[in-house]
Each structure stands twice: as C-alpha cells, then as structure tokens.
Amino acid sequence: MRTYTVAVNDLLTESPANRAISVSELNRQAKALLEQGIARIWVAGEISNLARPASGHLYFTLKDESAQLRCAFFRGRQRGPVINIKNGDQMLVFGKVSIFESRGEFQLIVEQVEEAGEGELLRRFEALKKTLAAEGLFSDERKQALPTLPSRIGVITSHTGAAVRDIVSVLRRRFPAIPVVIYPTAVQGEWAAPQIVGAIDTAIRRGECDVLIVGRGGGSLEDLWPFNEEIVARAIADCPIPVISAVGHEVDFTIADFVADVRAATPSGAAEIVVPDQAEWQRHLAIASTRIATLGRRYIEDRYQSIDWLGKRLAQSSPAATVARQRDWLRNLQQVMTGAMRHGLSHRAGKFERTRSQLLQHSPVLLVQRETSKTGSLEQRLRVAGANSVERLRQKLNLAARGLDAVSPLATLDRGYAIISDVESGRILTDAKKIEQGARIKARLARGAVEATVTKSLTENSDED
C-alpha cells in the first residue's frame, strides 16, 4: 500500500493556504490508494440505471438492499453475452475498485460479468468435480458390480415425486417378485443433501438391500444441486452397497453420477438396469427345467439298467428282496418326478392360456372387424348424404328450368305471337311505320316460319280490318 508522510512541524507552521492541495490531487491520491489497496474482486448485486451510449461502453449501478455501486464496463473488455444484461438482473461482476477523478465518484471498473446463481453453481460444480477426480473417486477400479438378481432393491428419493412412481412401475413390470424398500428424502432445497446422506446411512445400517437407486426427476441446475454437494458425493463413494445414480434426464449430469457405481440416464432407466426381464428368466428356467427332466430320465434309465444287471448277478445269491425294494423306490421316484413335471407343465399351460386370452383381446382381427363395421356405417352415411345432395340439386335444376321456361321467347310464341324480321337484312322489325310496302318479311312461329310480302302497313291509329 502506498503511504504519505507529512512533517508535523510543517503542518503547524505553514498557513492553511500553503498546506491545501487541489481537488484533482486529492482524487488522484484516493484513486491510487484504492487501486493499490484493494485487489480485483467479485461483487454480487442487482443491475439498475443501465445506460448504453453510442460508444459501446456500458454504465450501470450494482445494488443490494442497503447500498449501491457505480460500475463502468468498457467496450474493449466485453466478451460473450454481456450485452444482454438488463435492469433487474442479478449478476456477478468482477473488476477493480477505482475513482472517477473528474467527478470524485467511487466506482468499479468491470472486467467480467456473469449471471448470479447458475454461473456460481457451475464454478462450484467444476471445482468439486476436479477435486474428487484427483482423489480417484471417479475411477472404474473402485466401482462395484451390480448383483445379477437382487434380493431387495432400495430407492432413495422423494416418496411423492414422479421418479419413485416411474421406478416402481418399471420394476413391477419387469420383475414384480423382487421387493422394493423406499427410503424417503427431500431431493430439492438446502436440507435435501443432509437428508440424502441420512437415507444412505439408514440403508447401510439396516443392511436389507443389496443395491440402491439414488435419484430424482428432471429440473434446473438449482433443483438438482443437492446431488452435486460434496457430502452426498462422498456418502455414495463410501457406500458398501452398489449404488445406481438416476438424477434428472438423459442430458443432466451431476457429481453423484460420477461417483456412483453405475449412472442411469433417468429413474426409469435405473429400474431397467437393476433387474432382468422376468419373461426372459422364465424362458431360461423353462429350458433348464427341461434339461433337468431329461437328465433325470436318463439317470433313472441308467439306474434301471444297473439294477437289472445287479439283479442278474445277485440272482444266484438271492438278494431279491433288496432289489425289489430298490426297484419300487425308483418307480416311486419316477412317479414323483413325473407328477412334478406334469404339475409344472400344467402351470405353464395355464399361464400360456391366460396370455393367449389376453393376446386375443388385442387381436388385429377384432380391430379389423371393428374398423370394418365403422367403415360400413360411414359408407351408408355417405350413400344417404350423396342421395340427399343429388335430390337437392335435382330440385334446384327443376326450379331453374321452370324459371327459364317462364322467360323463354319460345313460350311467348306458343301463345300465338311471332317474331318478324326483314328477309334481306335479318333485322328484327318492331315498328310498322318503318316497313315499306312490298318489303319481304319473315315471321317465325312457335313451330316453323313463313315468308310474306307487305301489302299494307297499319299504325296504332289505323283502322284494322
């Protein structure tokens, strides 16, 4: 820090005018003290009084509940989406403290701007990820294998969320015989991380599950943050029970995903991973049962041959009673095995029949029949609608024909009128005064026409004979 020393005697002997310094000098010294005494820092606050002059620089005030700070963000330092900031935004501002000398205003010269909240969370995420990776908590060597067929599955999540419903639904569909234990916990908020750790400790202490699913549904980075907390990551890493992390959607990644033994893209995906398909297992069991039955029959047949051979050998020493007992025992064993096999086949036949009945209910044939019925109904409706439409058009046509007939000149001719035209010019004649005596005229009647020569013209005032 820069210091300033002034002799006391000088202050006592000099006049106030000689001791005074200029305002500019005072501001310059204050600026030097601030810039040298305070390092570059991050400051959080709300943007207000944002100004964007033509120079491209940004000037704004950063404020909180009780104070405010003037900030200057010069164009040469602006990078990325800073031009999108607006009044009311909560931001993290990095820069150095200074004084605007000409006005004596305390201000922050901004070098970097980030959104508050998610930007800070991302920095914390990357820092913790780097630390845990350096400790080897992400290495494949320390990850545990999942059991092929777990005896009991533990689920650590909210008991009211969609994730637990999705997980239970998939488990019930794939292998309903495996019991599920829910360890309810908060999965969002400041108390979620300690509760998740407590649920993991409870599962370890009880020792009732041989695999755990830890997770929740999708959300923002803030919503998923409990699964990025260090205490949760270390609890998962230290858990002696294999852990599947199922946090958020497929694109979401948390620290829990990296330290868990297996990462699932979604809670439903975790349920798909943790248990096999029961139908596939039943198929394998059916094949194994058939092989065991075949081997049993072969074993019995071999024993029969051995007994027959021994019987022949022992016939001379007459251990007939012993052989008979052995034969009866084998026959009884065969009956028991046959009964067991028949029972198993009957059980499978019943299950097959139920499955067949379910498939018939969803048969394409039934669907086709229903659609065919709908098509017939639609066809009938179309036929009726078409007939009605044709009838309406026929009625309109008849009305138009009657209207046309009413104004047709042919109808006028039927009432005894004629159309008179000049034979030579074809011009229609309407005025008797303009027809000369001896002119040849043509009279068109309702049926046919006649030609005549005018012998006399009669006007309206003339006497008609």
Image (tube, helix red, strand yellow):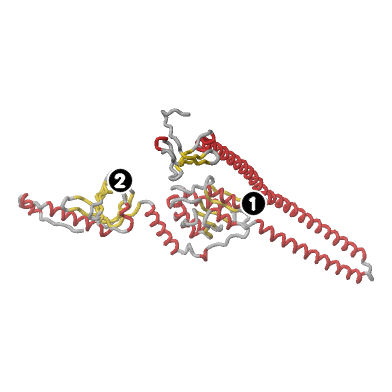
Amino acid on which the number 1 mark rests in the picture: Pro
Residue drawn at x 52%, y 66% is 141
Asked if residue 91 is positioned above or below residue 300 in the image, the reply reads: above
Residue 22 in the figure: left or right of residue 358: left
Q: Pinpoint residue 316: horizontal percent, then vertical percent.
A: 94, 71
Indicate which disc residue 176 carries. 1
In percent of width and height, residue 249 lies at 49, 54
Image quadrant assignment for residue 305? bottom right
Q: Say which element carries label 1.
A: loop
**Mark seen at residue 64:** 2
Foreground pick, 335 / 359: 359
Q: Position of residue 162 (x, y in %)?
A: 53, 47
What amino acid type is highlighted by mark number 2? Asp
Label 1, residues with CA under 10 Å away: few <14, some 14-19, many ≥20: some
The Cα atoms of the two marked residues, 2 and 1, are separated by 56 Å
Q: Could you tell me which secondary element the residue under label 2 belongs to?
A: loop
Q: Earlier in the sequence, mark 2 or mark 1?
A: 2
Looking at the image, how many numbered discs can be counted on the residues?
A: 2
Q: Nearer the viewer, residue 189 or 356?
A: 356
